[in-house]
Image (tube, rainbow, N blue to C red):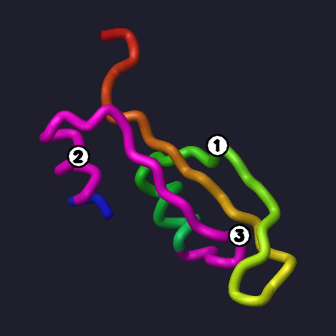
Amino acid sequence: MRQRVEFARETGYASMTLRTVNLLHSARRLYEEEGFTLTSEQPVRMFGKDDLVNQVWDLPLRDSTA
């Protein structure tokens, strides 16, 4: 994960967005460790389950004041 974030910064990406579902706790932990912020959640039916929540995680890669 860290290498991907570093690559995105070095190549000029403005931000990164990742998605997961609420039951994937290890993904959430990785995202938080790299500085991503949970920006939205939406109930969703996936994989035959009604009780999942789609999560969107964002990480700005550039200084917004620059």
- At mark 3, the secondary structure is loop
Mark 3 to mark 1 CA distance (whole Å): 13 Å
Pinpoint residue 8: horizontal percent, then vertical percent.
23, 46
Answer left or right for 58 relative to 9.
right
Q: Is residue 11 above or below residue 56?
A: above
Looking at the image, which is closer to me, 20 or 29? 20
Q: Say the numbered circle drawn on residue 39.
A: 1
- The tally of labels here is 3
User: Residue furthest toward the top?
Assistant: 65
| Residue 12 percent across, percent down from the top left | 18, 34
Looking at this view, name the residue that lies furthest to the left: 11
Dividing the picture into quadrants, the one containing residue 43 is: bottom right
Q: Which mark is residue 8?
A: 2
**Residue pictured at 44% horizontal, 42% vertical:** 59
Q: Amino acid at mark 3?
A: Asn
Location of the N terminus by quadrant is bottom left
Label 1 to label 2: alpha-carbon separation: 20 Å
C-alpha span from label 2 to label 3: 25 Å
What x and y, as percent, mark residue 58? 50, 44
Magenta residues, as a range? 4-26
Three-letter residue code for mark 1: Thr
Name which residue lies at 37% across and 10% down. Answer: 65
Residue behind mark 3 = 22
